[in-house]
Image (cartoon, rainbow, N blue to C red):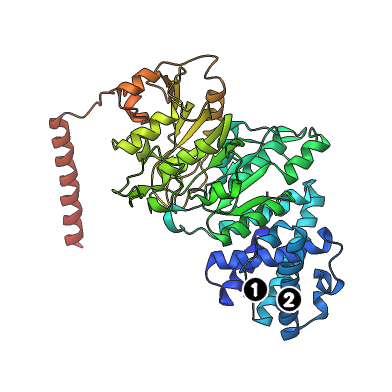
């Protein structure tokens, strides 16, 4: 956990950039990422020319410093390091260094230095690993970008990501992917979960969830896999790719594989070449939803939810399609057989009666085993949006399969996530997340059919009979609790007594 001193310095950095003209939070975090990468050159790239190392910046002042950083150090990162396969440098196509004000740059460098001094101080005081604290600093920086993005894009709360990791339970046995990764929160969450899973020293955080930082049970080969090969991401926004890569690097993943690519388009198949794309063992995602897109931009392999319409010449006709349905179809396509996914979807997807919605729900229970649905409380994504969402957990069986699943679908209706469900999102005393995880893990040991509870299982055939509807409220039994109201005569007598008190008070005022 970050100290108040570090948080204060992070806020100072934001305030200084804001005052210096970088008022767009995404632009600001992008420029901070460049500076942080320059800071890393000192220790991670010994071959860096001496004058380009962070420790020599104090030799330059004013406009000379600004020119040196922009025209020499930044260009070195873009042009020379990218040739050596440095992930962050590779992502910097069309990037530009926008801190042109010499005074602003000097202040930013000074604040970053002071932040790192505090990181080192905290590391000594509470035995936390430097990498862990450094990652927390970047996460705290990302929190400052708390504005809703376009097309339904917004950051998933960290504690929700932690819970999803517990539900999915990934391991160091396959590749982990987020097909619309944004700032990389899910990939960082997966990395931290695996470190915890392989740690000897375990603590419990403020949400009641386990956290480990030593990773002492990892073998050397597993450590190498974690840092260089397991985590894969895609995003359509080049700026978010850079931010996501830096986020993973700040947490200790030395070679994050995040690619600038639209996974719904045919570019994904072209990116994969002739090899089949079903290669990910685990997929975690909160893909953009409520987005209507042009079907002509969508890969022809995604043809089940929205079968292509063709004109008399056999050419595809334009349709307006929902992105969240296509993302689910793509996730199923990308999973390897027996691969698992945990995905956040808008709750309307679970009960909308449209043909495309029914089809994707059917696919989830034929190509896959839909194992569980966790209905999140409305307000979890405030202040971004008040859209109600659910988490789907499923395992892929076989692509384009017609055999329905035999297992029941487990439902859990969350009433709270441990925070106030308003724009302030204040932490509450209750810690509901561990209960969700506990009930999920023992769902097969002790099946529950009591639908008056927050969690229960529903047979596949019952879901089919309801048009593949997966809405928690449809299946839960609500118990009517009679209310004891006061008799009308009692209410009238109490009103009369109140009126007499008011009249008595008004008379006293008049006498004065």
Q: Is residue 358 above or below residue 266?
A: above
Q: Which residue is mark 2?
A: 69
Residue 239 appears in the picture as rendered:
yes
Of the pair 338 and 266, the residue shown nearer to us: 266
What x and y, as percent, mark residue 460? 40, 20
Of the pair 125 and 273, the residue shown nearer to us: 273
Position of 159 with respect to 253 (left or right) is left
Residue 383 appears in the picture as rendered:
no
What x and y, as percent, mark residue 14? 60, 67
Position of 489 with respect to 327 (left or right) is left
Q: Quadrant of residue 222?
A: top right
Residue ID at (49%, 41%): 330
Residue ID at (72%, 48%): 253
Q: Is residue 187 above or below residue 113?
A: above
Q: Are marks 2 and 1 in contact (CB under 8 Å)?
A: yes
Q: How many marks?
A: 2
What x and y, as percent, mark residue 201? 76, 35
Position of 403 with respect to 270 (left or right) is left
Q: Is residue 452 above or below residue 210?
A: above
Residue sitting at the far front: 313
Which sits earlier in the primary sequence, circle 2 or circle 1? 2
Count residues near mark 2 (Cα–Cα under 10 Å), then give few for <14, some for 14-19, many for 20+.
Answer: many
User: In the image, which disc is placed on residue 45?
Assistant: none
What x and y, as percent, mark residue 386? 39, 48
Q: Is residue 97 above or below residue 138?
A: below
- Quarter containing the C terminus: bottom left
Count residues near mark 1 (Cα–Cα under 10 Å), then give few for <14, some for 14-19, many for 20+.
Answer: some
Q: Which residue is mark 1?
A: 97
Disc 2 secondary structure class: helix
Residue ID at (50%, 35%): 332
């Amino acid at each position: 956990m970050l100290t108040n001193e570090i948080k204060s310095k992070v806020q100072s950095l934001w305030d200084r950039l804001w005052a210096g003209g970088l008022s767009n939070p995404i632009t600001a975090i992008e420029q901070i990422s460049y500076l942080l990468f320059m800071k890393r050159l000192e220790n991670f790239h010994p071959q860096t020319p001496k004058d380009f190392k962070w420790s020599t910046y104090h030799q330059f002042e004013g406009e000379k410093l600004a020119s040196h950083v922009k025209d020499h150090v930044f260009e070195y990162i873009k042009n020379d390091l990218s040739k050596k396969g440095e992930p962050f440098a590779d992502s910097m196509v069309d990037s530009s260094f926008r801190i042109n004000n010499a005074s602003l740059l000097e202040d930013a460098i000074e604040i970053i230095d002071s932040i790192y001094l505090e990181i080192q101080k905290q590391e000594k005081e509470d035995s936390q690993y430097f990498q862990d604290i450094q990652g927390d600093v970047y996460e705290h920086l990302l929190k400052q970008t708390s504005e809703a993005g376009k097309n339904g894009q917004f950051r998933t709360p960290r504690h929700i990501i932690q819970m999803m990791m517990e539900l999915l339970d990934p391991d160091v046995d396959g590749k982990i992917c987020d097909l619309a990764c944004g700032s990389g929160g899910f990939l960082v969450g997966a990395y931290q979960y695996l470190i915890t899973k392989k740690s000897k020293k375990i603590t419990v955080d403020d949400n009641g969830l386990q956290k480990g930082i030593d990773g002492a049970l990892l073998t050397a080969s597993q450590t190498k896999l974690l840092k260089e090969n397991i985590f894969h991401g895609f995003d359509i926004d080049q700026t978010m790719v850079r931010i996501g890569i830096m986020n993973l690097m700040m947490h200790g993943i030395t070679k994050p594989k995040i690619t600038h690519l639209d996974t719904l388009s045919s570019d994904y198949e072209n990116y994969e070449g002739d090899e089949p794309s079903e290669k990910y063992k685990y997929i975690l995602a909160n893909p953009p939803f409520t987005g209507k897109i042009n079907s002509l931009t969508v890969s022809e392999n995604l043809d089940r939810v929205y079968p292509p319409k063709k004109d008399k010449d056999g050419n595809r006709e334009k349709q307006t399609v929902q992105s969240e349905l296509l993302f689910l179809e793509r996730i199923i396509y990308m999973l390897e057989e027996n691969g698992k996914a945990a995905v956040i979807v808008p709750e309307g997807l679970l009960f909308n009666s449209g043909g495309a919605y029914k089809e994707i729900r059917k696919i989830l229970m034929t190509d896959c085993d839909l194992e569980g649905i966790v209905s999140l409380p409305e307000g979890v994504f405030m202040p971004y949006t008040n859209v109600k969402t659910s988490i789907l957990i499923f395992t892929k069986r076989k692509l384009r399969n017609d055999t329905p699943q035999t297992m029941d679908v487990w439902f859990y209706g969350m009433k709270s996530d441990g925070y106030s469900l308003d724009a302030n999102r204040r932490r509450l005393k209750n810690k509901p997340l561990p209960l969700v995880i506990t009930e999920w893990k023992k769902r097969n040991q002790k099946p529950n059919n009591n639908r008056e509870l927050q969690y229960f299982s529903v047979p596949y055939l019952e879901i089919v009979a309801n048009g593949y509807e997966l809405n928690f409220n449809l299946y839960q039994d609500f118990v009517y609790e009679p209310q004891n109201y006061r008799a009308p005569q009692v209410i009238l007598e109490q009103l009369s007594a109140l009126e007499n008190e008011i009249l008595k008070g008004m008379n006293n005022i008049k006498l004065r």
